[in-house]
Amino acid sequence: MTGKDILQKIKVKAGIGSSTSDTGKGKSKLSDRHITHGFQLVKGKSNHAMEDYVVAKFKKVNDSELGLFAIFDGHLGHDVADYLKSHLFENILHEPDFWTKTEDAIKNAYKETDTKILEKAVELGRGGSTAVTAILVDGEKLVVANVGDSRAVICKDGVAKQLSVDHEPRRERKIIEKKGGFVSNLPGDVPRVDGQLAVARAFGDRSLKMHLSSEPDVVVEMIEPGTECLILASDGLWKVMSNQEAVDSIRHIKDAQSAAKHLSDEALSRKSKDDISCIVVCFH
């Protein structure tokens, strides 16, 4: 590693710079299954540092193998997303009901993690982060949760199925207004909570929290014959590609890391200006 590379890593750690891209891959150690994953992050054209963070790994817990995949898309700074990368899965797995009431455990962990983020507002700043998480249990059971507009899409027999929910302010206008907030809808702009945030659910965002939810939508999906791949990506991808377009563009690519890079490159070619983070899990 050169001195320039070391300096860049120090800058990223300190929050005063960002690498333009990052990539990686891994695979399941289950002998009866061939599951691989790859990820790609590309910094957008904004002047601020990279605000997306990714988790993509397999981990042995008790007698099970867990695939832990997540994308955290920060806004107004990257500290909340960085905190989530380090703590959210840890908090989920420490829930006493994780193995018996997984959906409830995830919801509780999301809530408690958000509470801790708000308590650390002086340290973490006024920003926030969306999140989409996927936990793959023994290669058979997939549990997806999300707040915000990062998205999880699974492909079965060539057909794309969205597992997450896009938490758009317009969609949750009545809930926001019931809490005393409002949704702006100015010409040429997207709907925003209190005229500020373009998502109705997120971690952090202390100044908006009275009108903003951090409760995730959670769904369980079984991995069946015909399941080809899972895509997790930030809105930097989904702003320029539909679910089916994303699936169609990588079905022929067997290497998960190459598939993730292909999606990021395609988003760039379609003039996406936002940070782009993408994880692809392939079920061979």
Image (cartoon, rainbow, N blue to C red):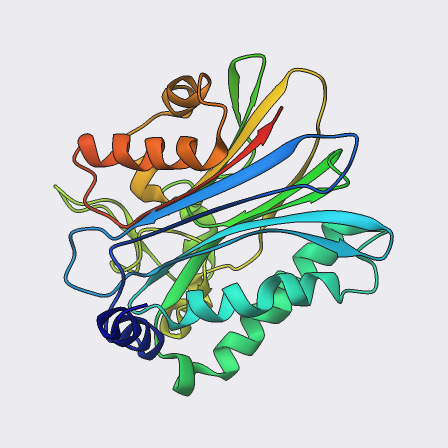
Residue 180 visible to an observer of this rendering: no
The residue sitting at 21% across, 36% down in the picture is 268
Determine whether 135 is above or below 205 in the image: above
The residue sitting at 41% across, 85% down in the picture is 123
- In depth, the one of 156 and 29 nearer the eye is 29
Image coordinates of residue 284 in percent, x first then y, are: 62, 23
Image coordinates of residue 212 in percent, x first then y, are: 45, 61
- In depth, the one of 106 and 29 nearer the eye is 29
Residue 278 visible to an observer of this rendering: yes
Image coordinates of residue 277 in percent, x first then y, are: 37, 47
Q: Residue furthest top?
A: 157
* Left or right: 68 in relation to 231: right
The residue sitting at 24% across, 65% down in the picture is 49
- In depth, the one of 110 and 62 nearer the eye is 62
Q: Which corner quadrant of the image does residue 150 belong to? A: top left
The residue sitting at 34% across, 43% down in the picture is 235
- In depth, the one of 277 and 191 nearer the eye is 277
